[in-house]
Structures are given as structure tokens and as C-alpha cells.
Image: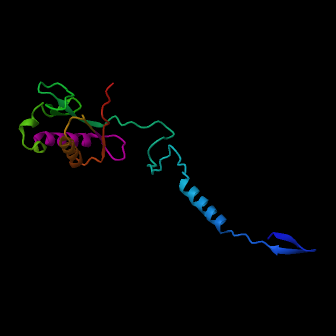
């Protein structure tokens, strides 16, 4: 501590001076709390933590394309049998390759379209494709369900049910079409 010298008469008297540190400690703690609350930690941008499959993605060679894939198309047609983009008034048409399984409006007259013979015929066609498949896919015959955005979900589920009934494990859904 600092010593203060006083002169009293002819002699110097030294006294110890005491400082009160309580206000300074209070200020330091207030500053510490302020900076802890005001600090914004910077998060790394563009990083997404995820667990990706190890057997897919960028590989050393070219990816193998299976040309034997089956594409189930659920199209949206108008009453005249032409493709349409109208939200209402359309009908579902199921196609695999060039083969149509129904005409526009066939499902409109049915109370339960999921019990239609269309789905049974689709299932039989899938079984034929599965039986004749000679590709090298690990999961077997690849099937892509390609539904237009206007097609009600119940038809997509009916197509998926037939794929599952056929015992096909490699099922994907096509991305929606992008208008240019």
C-alpha cells in the first residue's frame, strides 16, 4: 500500500492509506456481465452437419446407370384426353412406358378409385418387369414414380402400394417438372 508522509512539527509521520476496492470490483463484474450478454458468437456459414450415406455420392469412376428402370407416370389430362396444367377438372391417367392403363375420366365414375382394376393391371406389369429384370442393382428393379403436381395424393399412394405388393425395394419419386 501507498504510504503517505505527513509532516508534523519537525518529524514525519507515516500513515497507511486504505483504498476501498468494492466499487471497482462491482464495475468489473458489471462489465464482465455486459460483455458476456452482448457478445454474438459467429456461427460458420454454409456448414450443415449431416450423416450422409457412405456408398453414394462422388466416386472415383463414372456412376452406373441402370437402363432397365421402370417409370410409372401419373399424368393429369383434361376431359378431351390431352395433358393439362389446370388445377381442377382434370383426370388421372396411369402410364408405364407407352402403355396406358386407363383413359381420362375412368376414375371419375368410381366411388373407390383405389379398388380399380387399373392398379391390379399395374401390379401385374410390375411383376413382369421384376421377373425379366437382369440388371445389376443391389436392391433389384429400380422404379420411379413420376406424378404431376395436380394428381391427388391418393393415386400416388395407390401406385406405391402396387410397387410394394410386387416386392420392389428400389423406389424413388421423380422431382416435379420445372416450367421454363
Q: Tell me where residue 57 sits by quadrant.
A: top left
Locate the C terminus by quadrant.
top left
Locate the N terminus by quadrant.
bottom right
- Residue 79 lies, with reference to residue 5, above or below; the image says above
Is residue 127 shown in magenta? yes
The residue at the point 36 percent across, 43 percent down is 137
The residue at the point 27 percent across, 46 percent down is 168
Magenta span covers which residues?
116-144
Residue 8, percent across and down?
88, 74
| 168 relative to 43 in the view: left or right | left
Residue 174, percent across and down?
31, 37
Colour scheme = rainbow
Is residue 140 shown in magenta? yes
Q: How many marks?
A: 0
Q: Tell me where residue 14 sits by quadrant.
A: bottom right
Which one is in front, 41 or 49? Answer: 41
The residue at the point 47 percent across, 36 percent down is 62
Residue 37, percent across and down?
53, 56
- Residue 179 lies, with reference to residue 63, above or below; the image says above
| 154 relative to 171 in the view: left or right | left
Which one is in front, 31 or 114? Answer: 31
- Residue 106 lies, with reference to residue 154, above or below; the image says above
Amino acid at each position: 500500500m501507498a504510504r503517505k508522509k505527513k509532516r508534523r512539527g519537525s518529524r514525519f509521520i507515516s500513515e497507511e492509506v486504505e483504498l476501498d476496492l468494492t466499487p471497482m470490483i462491482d464495475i468489473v463484474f458489471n462489465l464482465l456481465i455486459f460483455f458476456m450478454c452482448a457478445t454474438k458468437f459467429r456461427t460458420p456459414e454454409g456448414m450443415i452437419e449431416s450423416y450422409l450415406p457412405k456408398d453414394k455420392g462422388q466416386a472415383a469412376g463414372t456412376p452406373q446407370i441402370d437402363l432397365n428402370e421402370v417409370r410409372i407416370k401419373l399424368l393429369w389430362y383434361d376431359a378431351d384426353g390431352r395433358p393439362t396444367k389446370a388445377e381442377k377438372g382434370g383426370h388421372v391417367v396411369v402410364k408405364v412406358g407407352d402403355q396406358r392403363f386407363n383413359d381420362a375420366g375412368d376414375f371419375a365414375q368410381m366411388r373407390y378409385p383405389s379398388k380399380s382394376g387399373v392398379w391390379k393391371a399395374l401390379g401385374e406389369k410390375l411383376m413382369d418387369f421384376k421377373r425379366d429384370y437382369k440388371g445389376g442393382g443391389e436392391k433389384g428393379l429400380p422404379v420411379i414414380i413420376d406424378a404431376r403436381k395436380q394428381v391427388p395424393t391418393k393415386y400416388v399412394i395407390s401406385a406405391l402400394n402396387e410397387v410394394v405388393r410386387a416386392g420392389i425395394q428400389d423406389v424413388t419419386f421423380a422431382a416435379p417438372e420445372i416450367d421454363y
